[in-house]
Amino acid sequence: MDIDPVRGDITTQDVDAVVNAANQALAGGGVDGAIHRAAGRRELQEACQQLGGCATGDAKATPGFGLTARWIIHAVGPRWRGGGKGEAELLASCYRRSLEVADELGAKSVAFPAISTGIYGYPPEEAARIAVDTIRSTPTQVELVRLVAFDEATYRRYVDLLG
Ligand code: AR6
């Protein structure tokens, strides 16, 4: 599998599936807001409502609607609470579950945002390490993972970790 760091906007990625940093209710701002705007708010909201929420650490798919990507995989990252509340395992679980859902869909290319590092306050350095380690160690049919960094510092971190 190739893991490519890119600087950019997840909503415009030309991949089979983009991952959304969602919340348990599957309705929010941040990347989520951008994805809802780009995919088509009404259709995506309806599709999310039918999923009946999503647990922290889990992931569920909807169609991509107006996106180039055929699917959106909604993953719910942990809110940072100091590190002693299982945050690392829950964040790793988001990446693992997203790849499992991608396999169920038959998606061969998947783009991830830096889950939990915005509104949820996860320390970005540690989050990047978990992202890279978990993607590398998860058995999957996905051939290309794009790590989409919204800012330069996140991009640099991915480049350093990927060597
Ligand atoms: N493309 C790629 N990355 C982006 C984009 C974009 N268009 N926009 C923001 N980011 P966040 P969280 C980066 O806050 O921390 C939502 O309301 C951003 O710079 O979207 O998991 C959900 O519904 C940051 O590095 O997600 C939840 O309520 C990263 O994406 C809550 O926020 C994640 O930022 C989830 O918080």
Image: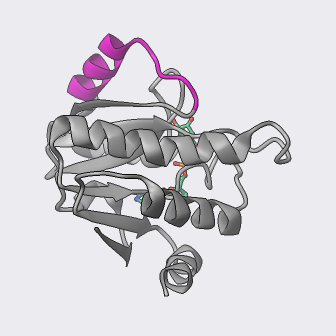
- Residue 89: x and y in percent read 66, 43
Question: Is residue 72 left or right of 129 when viewed as pictured?
Answer: left
Look at the image and say whether residue 139 sits in the magenta stretch.
no
Q: Residue at x 17, y 62 (%)?
A: 14
- Residue 15: x and y in percent read 19, 58
Q: Residue at x 62, y 39 (%)?
A: 90
Q: Quadrant of residue 62?
A: top left
Q: Does any portion of residue 32 appear in the rendered image?
A: no
Q: Does any portion of residue 25 appear in the rendered image?
A: yes
Chief SS of the magenta region: helix
Question: Is residue 98 left or right of 134 when viewed as pictured?
Answer: left
- Residue 119: x and y in percent read 64, 46
The boundaries of the magenta stretch are: 42-56
- Residue 141: x and y in percent read 23, 52
Look at the image and say whether residue 55 sits in the magenta stretch.
yes
Q: Which image quarter holds the N terminus?
A: bottom left
Image height of 76 relative to 70, above or below: above
The foreground one among 14 and 2 is 2
